[in-house]
Image: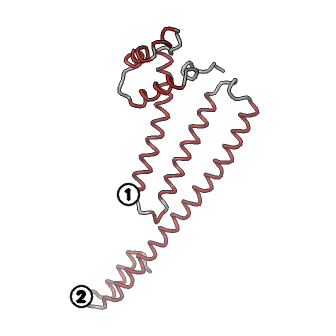
Amino acid sequence: MGRKSSIDRLSAEVKGHIERRIAEGRMTLDELIAELRATFPDEAAEGELPSRTAVHRYGQKLERRLSAIRASTEAAKIIQAQAGDDKDARSEALTALIQTELFEAILDMQEATGDEIDSADRVGMLSAAAKNIATLTRSSVNLKQFQAKVEDDTRKRLLEEQRAKLDAMGSKGGVTEDTKRAIREALGMV
């Protein structure tokens, strides 16, 4: 396995500065490197600032994570704004967010070097992740079953309302029993 990234070895101040600038997305890579040299002249003089390539690699990794988080957050906001919660849409969005985080954690663990995580710890973390994924999957299945039941109950309630309205119509307006029977058959009320 490779060694720790030169950015991960930086001071918290410098690393935080790089992460903020990458997250803002307002600078080119060359502009960011120039700004680092100007903002942290002591580190630049001592050769402690990362190379352009290291910043690029780190930026790609950070951007991938930020994109996943943005997408999950946006999906949760849209679901919350557009859906009533009779089908527990917020729980579905929360499950999706947790799945994204678990995926990211597994990617982080795969990228970690041997010095950071030994084999026994890695197996323990994977075991814990597998257990949590199984629990999350069961939760997802239960949620889907609940949503299906809500849809089924809603459909039944709607059909009962339609049946009651058809029965209340009588034969006014030229609606015959044959017509009502045809409507019931078309709606699956038979």
Residue 65, percent from left and from top: 50, 34
Residue kind at label 1, given as amino acid type: Gln
* Label 2 vs label 1, nearer the camera: 1
Q: Is residue 144 left or right of residue 160?
A: right
Query: Between residues 13 and 108, which one lies in front from this camera angle?
Result: 13
Mark 2 and mark 1 lie on one chain; the one further toward the N terminus is 1
The C terminus, quarter of image: bottom left
Residue furthest to the front in view is 42
Neighbour class for label 1 at 10 Å: few (<14), some, many (≥20)? few
The N terminus, quarter of image: top right
Q: CA distance from mark 2 to mark 1?
A: 41 Å
Residue furthest to the left in view is 173
Name the colouring of the figure.
secondary structure
- Identify the residue at image location x=57%, y=40%: 103
User: How many marks do you count on the picture?
Assistant: 2
Residue 138, percent from left and from top: 63, 55
Residue kind at label 2, given as amino acid type: Gly
Q: Which mark is residue 174?
A: 2
Can you identify the residue that label 1 sits on? Answer: 82
Is 72 placed above or below 115 here? below
Residue 59, percent from left and from top: 47, 25
